[in-house]
Image (tube, grey):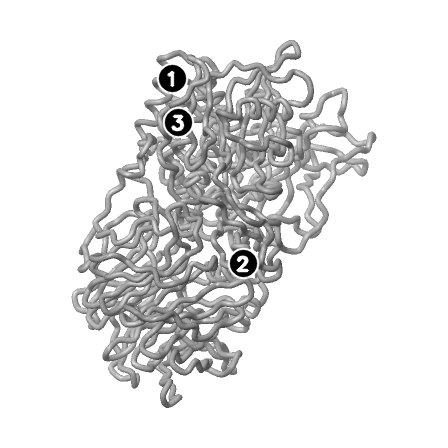
């Protein structure tokens, strides 16, 4: 379960190593106990009779009931174990069952029963999956309304998409309004500990930062309304930038022809990007028009039922209107003759249509599978989408169809490489079988399997041998000028291992590393394919995917599934040894997570929180934490930044989420999320009582405390603006720093009764940006020396003993780099601490400062996800002398930095795959 949820808030990790088999029902069988459950995760080698009459699902449930002492499933009725379907293949039946708790779906709670059936008699040969026996919820009735859950889900996604800087809209435009919407999907139990009841909300729309579509699955705690987990639900080929699925202008989904006067299959021809002339199956309608629809996969005796492969002309359509929906008025590509000309080559239509047929043939010929969904459902491809009128260099599966970005510059249209088409269609196969959740290790396995089969299909369709040095490359044919190795987006033969290459990543980054970490697993599969040959290896991986894996499996469970599938298919001892050694070589062995090293002092491990930050000052830290399985609502803890002593819990255990902890070294403050409001608490770091000092009815962020002033940001996702408010913790008086809802303020810092913040306001020619300091005692405001006519972004502020520091982006070309600047409180003495370009420049995203040092979080533009594009920390002197130095050389995410005194800085670190609170007392220097 921990593969997705043990650190679901910030980081995604692997399940604890499975225990050795302890109870075997027969000499030839083996039982692998589950983690955090009494139900085994894998049982193999069985030969136990099952009911031969009735449905396969009934027989599977009856088996689980009869073997209650093995499976520990109390209620095996159809009410609590609903059938997701049965796959029959060569005398074998595979039944997938969905766990429900008091009638509510349990996320990832799937159990698989494998049987053979001969002469009317069924025999159970094995089981696997996740059934969570520790769930214990008093009620499955949400306290949070659906309306509140949707509002908070939208706010949570808006906060994640917002980035580190306040940015002005382009000239002539207004701040984004209503770009996101939410739709309730029902109530879901997250299987953490005794269970967390949530409302699942799907948030869709357009990312206002870059125009890409958004589709986030957000889980809102049904008791308090806090967003406990969110991830993107679109499966892309390349980890380039932010992608998702969005609502947009929609048209009707196309239907298959049933007109007997049509010519269902007409042979045509076209030229692929690589110059190869290929046969193309077309359809000729009653008007005599040709369309890129392939009905050739249908049986001759039933030509109007079965598979249809259709390729649609989406050239010039915005990706946000083609993802998750059908763009209005879209039509198939329609050549005027059966000889498709250059237009159909250059648009990517020929490659997309031809390759879709090859993918169908591969799954049909090798495994007997009827299309993506196994039921001959229609296969749709949309080719040529753009982003903001510019090339969209990516491709994705959105749950119903493939979408390929239009090429331009260095890239061809993304259907140009067969492995891309195979990759995206395999996402659909996975969705209709194991359903691997697209986040963390399960998401990395989802990507790995798409890469594996995409590559296998590419090699077969193009007659390429695995002995070819470039055989393991993916996306190598996408470039217009670069050679295969320079062009390829991934390499299955890159030798990636868990110990050297695994990167702990937040959901914000690549959905928890779905692309970053995928070649660790796909590399093991590739090695196995080299050792066993394609035919046997492909059968093993397909069987593991469709009959063993379940949604929340991590690398360790994935290995077990592949090994078990190989055994079921009757491999020899020598072949089985090669299967296991392939995973060994990539470090996928039980307990591999413990081998990941760091150069930091760990203060707290496995804090298991999401997006709630860290506070530090005066030798004290404050943060939210949960228990190790993440099932407890977050509570606020205070401790010593030295790491000495025992941390103390400050917030009550009242079932609500207590988050955004901040401290000035004397008091600690936090926000308590309730079903209908958010309440602010303050309590001394030593002895003293908890005091509620105010609250709001909406989401908040950026809570900061110093002395009597508690400041925070209230986002308005519907109008695209944010507003800084503050509360006097002695009097309880609450005030908005700029008493105008037309002025955006954000990213506050507080010191000695003054509040600094980023500000955006409208003038006659455009919106302007600046940094302002507000004196709460006098009401006086002072603008810092920011060039309002050139600045395009302003970032986090930090008040210190002699001034204010901020991030300033004046680059109209938007390279992603930004300067760090500081000035005295009256605006004098402007200093450039780090420049926007040249030596010492940084991709500044956020910052925190003590009186002696400034720590900057950097986040380079993610044209492709890699360790050096993840958040990293740099430290620099207030005068900028000596330039910035790396705080830590740890691999993985370094987020929510909080400066204490001197050079000491604390942050949440993801290197080990868990969320750990760590510190360093001085920079590491160069890495």
Is residue 658 among what the camera can see? Answer: yes
Task: Report the front residue among 766 and 63.
Answer: 63
Point out the tag, 1 or 2, that comes first from the N-terminus.
Answer: 2
Seen as rendered, the residue at the extreme bottom is 778
Q: Position of residue 718 (x, y in %)?
A: 57, 67
First of labels 3, 2 by sequence position: 2
Q: Residues within 10 Å of mark 2 (few under 14, many from 20)?
A: many
Query: Residue at left 76%, top 25%?
Result: 303
Helix or strand or loop: what does disc 3 sit on? helix
On the question of residue 317 being in view, the answer is: no
> In this rendering, is residue 508 above or below 438?
below
- Secondary structure under tag 2 reads helix
Percent across and percent down for residue 858 are 32, 59
Give me the residue at 38% from left, 88% from top: 780
Crowding at dot 3, Cα within 10 Å, few <14 / some 14-19 / many 20+, comes out as many
Callout 1: 10 Å neighbours few (<14), some, many (20+)?
A: some
Report the residue marked by disc 1. Answer: 576
Q: Which of marks 3 and 1 is nearer the N terminus?
A: 3
Give me the C-alpha separation between circle 1 and circle 2. 47 Å
Which quadrant of the figure has residue 689? bottom left
Q: Residue 403: percent from the left, percent from the top?
A: 57, 44
Residue denoted by label 3:
526
The residues bearing labels 3 and 1 have C-alpha atoms spaced at a distance of: 15 Å
Which one is closest to the eye, mark 3 or mark 2?
Answer: 2
């Amino acid at each position: 379960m921990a593969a997705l949820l043990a650190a679901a808030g910030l980081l995604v990790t692997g399940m604890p190593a499975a225990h050795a088999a302890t109870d075997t029902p027969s000499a030839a069988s083996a039982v692998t106990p589950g983690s955090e459950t009494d139900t085994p995760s894998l049982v193999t080698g069985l030969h136990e009779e099952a009911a031969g009459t009735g449905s396969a699902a009934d027989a599977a449930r009856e088996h689980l009931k009869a073997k209650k002492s093995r499976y520990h499933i109390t209620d095996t009725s159809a009410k609590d174990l609903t059938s997701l379907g049965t796959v029959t293949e060569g005398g074998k039946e595979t039944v997938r069952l969905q766990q429900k708790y008091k009638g509510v779906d349990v996320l990832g709670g799937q159990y698989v029963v494998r049987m053979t059936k001969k002469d009317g008699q069924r025999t159970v040969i094995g089981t696997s999956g996740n059934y969570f026996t520790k769930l214990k919820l008093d009620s499955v009735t949400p306290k949070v309304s659906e309306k509140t859950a949707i509002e908070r889900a939208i706010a949570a996604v808006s906060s994640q998409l917002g980035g580190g800087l306040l940015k002005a809209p382009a000239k002539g435009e207004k701040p984004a309004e209503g770009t996101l919407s939410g739709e309730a999907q029902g109530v879901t139990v997250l299987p953490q500990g005794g269970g967390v009841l949530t409302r699942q909300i799907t948030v869709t729309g357009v990312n206002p930062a870059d125009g890409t579509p958004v589709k986030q699955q957000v889980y809102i705690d049904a008791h308090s309304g806090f967003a406990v987990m969110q991830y993107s639900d679109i499966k892309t080929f390349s980890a380039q930038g932010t992608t998702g699925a969005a609502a947009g202008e929609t048209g009707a989904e196309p239907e298959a022809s049933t007109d007997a006067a049509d010519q269902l299959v007409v042979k045509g021809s076209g030229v692929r990007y690589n110059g190869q002339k290929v046969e193309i199956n077309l359809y000729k309608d009653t008007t005599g028009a040709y369309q890129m629809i392939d009905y050739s996969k249908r049986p001759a005796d039933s030509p109007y039922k079965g598979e249809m492969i259709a390729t649609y002309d989406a050239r010039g359509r915005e990706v946000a209107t083609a993802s998750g929906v059908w763009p209005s008025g879209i039509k198939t590509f329609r050549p005027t003759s059966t000889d498709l000309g250059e237009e159909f080559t250059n648009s990517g239509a020929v490659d997309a249509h031809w390759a879709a047929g090859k993918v169908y043939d591969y799954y049909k010929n090798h495994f007997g599978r009827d299309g993506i969904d196994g039921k001959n459902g229609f296969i749709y491809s949309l080719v040529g989408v753009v982003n903001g009128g510019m090339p969209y260099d990516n491709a994705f599966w959105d749950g119903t169809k493939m979408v390929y970005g239009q090429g331009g510059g260095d890239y061809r249209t993304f259907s140009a490489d067969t492995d891309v088409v195979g990759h995206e269609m395999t996402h659909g196969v996975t969705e209709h079988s194991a359903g691997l959740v697209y986040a963390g290790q399960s998401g990395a396995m989802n990507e790995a399997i798409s890469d594996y089969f995409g590559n296998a299909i590419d090699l077969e369709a193009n007659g390429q041998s695995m002995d070819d040095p470039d055989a393991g490359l993916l996306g190598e044919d996408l470039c217009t000028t670069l050679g295969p190795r320079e062009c390829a987006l991934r390499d299955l033969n890159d030798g990636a291992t868990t110990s050297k290459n695994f990167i702990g990543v937040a959901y914000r980054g690549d959905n928890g590393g779905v692309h970053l970490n995928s070649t660790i697993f796909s590399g093991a599969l590739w090695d196995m394919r080299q050792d066993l040959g394609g035919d046997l290896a492909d059968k093993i991986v397909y069987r593991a995917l469709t009959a063993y894996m379940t949604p929340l499996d991590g690398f360790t469970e994935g290995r077990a599934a592949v090994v078990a599938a190989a055994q079921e298919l009757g491999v020899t001892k020598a072949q089985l040894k090669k299967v296991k050694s392939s995973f060994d070589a990539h470090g996928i062995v039980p307990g591999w997570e413990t081998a990941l090293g760091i150069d930091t002092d760990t203060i707290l491990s496995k804090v298991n929180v999401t997006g709630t930050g860290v506070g530090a000052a005066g030798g004290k830290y404050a943060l939210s934490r949960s228990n190790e399985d993440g099932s407890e609502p977050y509570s606020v803890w205070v401790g010593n930044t030295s790491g000495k002593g025992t941390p103390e819990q400050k917030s009550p255990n009242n079932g609500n989420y207590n988050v955004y902890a901040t401290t000035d070294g004397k008091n600690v403050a936090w926000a308590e999320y309730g079903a209908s409001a958010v309440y602010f608490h303050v309590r001394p770091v030593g002895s003293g009582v908890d005091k509620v000092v105010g609250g709001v009815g909406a989401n908040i962020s950026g809570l900061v405390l110093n002395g009597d002033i508690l400041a925070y940001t209230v986002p308005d996702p519907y109008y695209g603006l944010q507003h800084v408010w503050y509360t006097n913790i002695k009097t309880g008086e609450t005030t908005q720093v700029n008493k105008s809802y037309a002025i955006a303020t954000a990213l506050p810092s507080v010191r000695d009764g003054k509040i600094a913040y980023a500000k955006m306001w409208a003038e006659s020619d455009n919106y302007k940006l600046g940094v302002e300091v507000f004196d709460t005692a006098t009401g006086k405001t002072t603008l810092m020396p920011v060039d309002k006519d050139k600045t395009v972004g302003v970032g986090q502020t930090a008040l210190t003993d002699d001034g204010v520091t901020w991030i300033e982006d004046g680059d109209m070309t938007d390279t992603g780099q930004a300067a760090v600047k500081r000035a005295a409180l009256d605006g004098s003495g402007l200093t450039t601490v780090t420049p926007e370009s040249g030596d010492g420049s940084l991709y500044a995203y956020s910052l925190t400062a003590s009186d002696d040092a400034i720590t900057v979080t950097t986040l380079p533009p993610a044209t492709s996800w890699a360790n050096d594009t993840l958040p990293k920390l740099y430290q620099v002197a207030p005068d900028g002398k000596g330039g910035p130095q790396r705080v830590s050389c740890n691999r993985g995410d370094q987020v929510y930095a909080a400066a204490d005194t001197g050079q000491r800085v604390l942050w949440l670190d993801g290197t080990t795959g868990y969320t750990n609170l760590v510190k360093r007392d001085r920079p590491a220097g160069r890495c």
